[in-house]
Image (tube, rainbow, N blue to C red):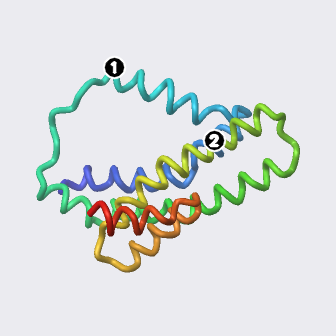
Amino acid sequence: MTSLASWRYALFALLTLIPVPVLGWLLGNNWLMPWLIFVLVPLLDLAVGRDPRNPSPEQERQLATHWRFRLGLYAQVPVQLALIVWGAMVIASGQLSTSQALGLTLSIGLSTGGQGIMIAHELGHTKSLFDRVLAWLLLVSVIYGHFYIDHNSGHH
């Protein structure tokens, strides 16, 4: 794996440390995450198009075990748990309008439910007990802990 490619995953880990719902809150727009997910990302997907350069299975195995890639996965756990607690505190404070509280709730749900479950899925497929415990923590934090057993025991 090239050094540049592996550093992209370290950048992903750093970006994970500032979740989009927090960025939206700081900018005064708690609807930022739904707007990005349902409007901007589909438009960018159309504009960029299909990428025919997929990594080989061997390259995928190398990437999946590289520490910079794993750092991004591991960073999601404390960030997700902190995001849920922070969001609950902000909403419970009563300082947001109903619309902005709904936007923040949806933003946190999209972040933890989308990114968190996807990362839990990746971690749950490893042989490492540490990775599987982190997967379980991510899933339990979004009240989806049964996925860990259903998916790994039933689907696979």
Q: Position of residue 109 (x, y in %)?
A: 60, 46
Q: Position of residue 69 (x, y in %)?
A: 33, 60
Horizontal arrangement in the rendering, residue 44 relative to residue 93 (left or right): left
Q: Position of residue 21 (x, y in %)?
A: 63, 43
Relative to residue 147, is residue 100 depicted above or below? above
Residue 142 x, y percent position in the rendering: 57, 58
Tell me the tag on residue 23: 2
Residue matched to label 1: 47
Residue 156 location, quadrant = bottom left
- Is residue 91 rendered to the left or right of residue 42? right
Q: Residue at x 55, y 47 (%)?
A: 111
At label 2, the amino acid type is Leu
Q: Quadrant of residue 125?
A: bottom left
Crowdedness near tag 2: few (<14), some (14–19) or many (≥20) residues, C-alpha within 10 Å: some
Q: Residue at x 19, y 54 (%)?
A: 2
Mark 1, other Cα within 10 Å: few <14 / some 14–19 / many ≥20: few
**Residue situated furthest front in the rendering:** 154
Q: On residue 78, which mark appears?
A: none
In the image, is 138 to the left or to the right of 2?
Answer: right
Give the residue displayed 32% in from the left and 64% down from the top. Answer: 154
* Residue sitting nearer the eye, 28 or 106: 106
Of the image marks 1 and 2, the number of the one nearer the N terminus: 2
Q: CA distance from mark 1 to mark 2?
A: 25 Å
Q: Secondary structure at mark 2?
A: helix
Residue type at the position of mark 1: Ala
Q: Residue furthest right?
A: 94
| 137 to the left or right of 71 | right
Secondary element at image label 1: helix
